């Protein structure tokens, strides 16, 4: 996956280790070999994406795609999404929500905040693996501005 000829780094914010391994395995199985940087909490992910000063300048020339769980131990994924999408340096970064939350209001809120894709993680392992495989195929043909 490339953006304007440059490699895209996938930022995965997922606190469930089993889900994180499954996501990475199926993204790889779909032929996407970009670097994946995992984070298990929102604070560390925001430190990476926005910088410790939260200015966002650290990501000014980065090509990132963010996979974001909404249920994290230290903050909500919607707070992370809001901070990324309201920052002038990171607002165009594609954010894919990957969560077990299927509440219609929560889905709409994420889209209102600027989420690009919202995927509900099926609780069933096989269906979850299939959804992530399809996501990997989507990444393999996706262009990031």
Image: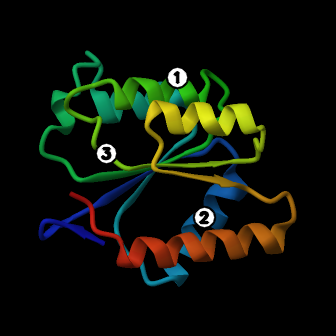
Distance in Å between CA atoms under marks 1 and 3: 15 Å
Q: Residue placed at 36% from the left, 78% from the top? A: 141
Distance in Å between CA atoms under marks 1 and 2: 22 Å
Note whether 73 is above or below 108 in the view shown.
Answer: above
Identify which residue, 123 or 138, lies in the foreground: 138
Q: Earlier in the sequence, mark 1 or mark 3?
A: 1
Residue 61, quarter of picture: top left
Disc 1 to disc 2: CB gap under 8 Å: no
Q: Residue placed at 76% from the left, 47% from the top? A: 100
Q: Residues within 10 Å of mark 1 (few under 14, many from 20)?
A: some
Q: Which residue is mark 2?
A: 23
Left or right, residue 115 beside residue 92? right
Q: Residue placed at 14% from the left, 38% from the top? A: 60
Which numbered marker is on residue 79? 1
Residue 56 in the image: state x and y as whole percent.
23, 27
Question: Dot 2: what SS?
Answer: helix
Residue 114 in the image: state x and y as whole percent.
43, 37
Disc 1 to disc 3: CB gap under 8 Å: no
Residue 74 in the image: state x and y as whole percent.
62, 21
Residue 57, quarter of picture: top left
Question: Dot 1: what SS?
Answer: helix
Residue 8, quarter of picture: bottom left
Q: Which residue is mark 3?
A: 93
Q: Residues within 10 Å of mark 2 (few under 14, many from 20)?
A: many
Query: Which label lies toward us, 3 or 2?
Result: 3
């Amino acid at each position: 996956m490339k953006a304007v000829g440059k490699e895209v780094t996938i930022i995965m914010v997922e606190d469930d280790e089993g889900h994180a391994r499954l996501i990475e395995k199926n993204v790889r199985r779909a032929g996407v070999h970009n670097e994946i940087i995992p984070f298990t909490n929102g604070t560390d992910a925001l430190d990476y994406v926005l910088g410790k000063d939260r200015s966002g300048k650290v990501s000014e020339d980065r090509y990132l795609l963010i996979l974001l769980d909404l249920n994290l131990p230290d903050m909500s994924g919607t707070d992370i999404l809001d901070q990324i999408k309201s920052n002038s340096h990171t607002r165009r970064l594609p954010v894919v929500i990957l969560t077990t939350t299927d509440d219609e209001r929560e889905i709409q809120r994420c889209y209102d905040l600027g989420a690009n894709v919202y995927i509900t993680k099926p609780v069933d392992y096989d269906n979850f693996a299939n959804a992530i495989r399809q996501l990997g195929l989507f990444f393999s043909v996706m262009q990031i501005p």
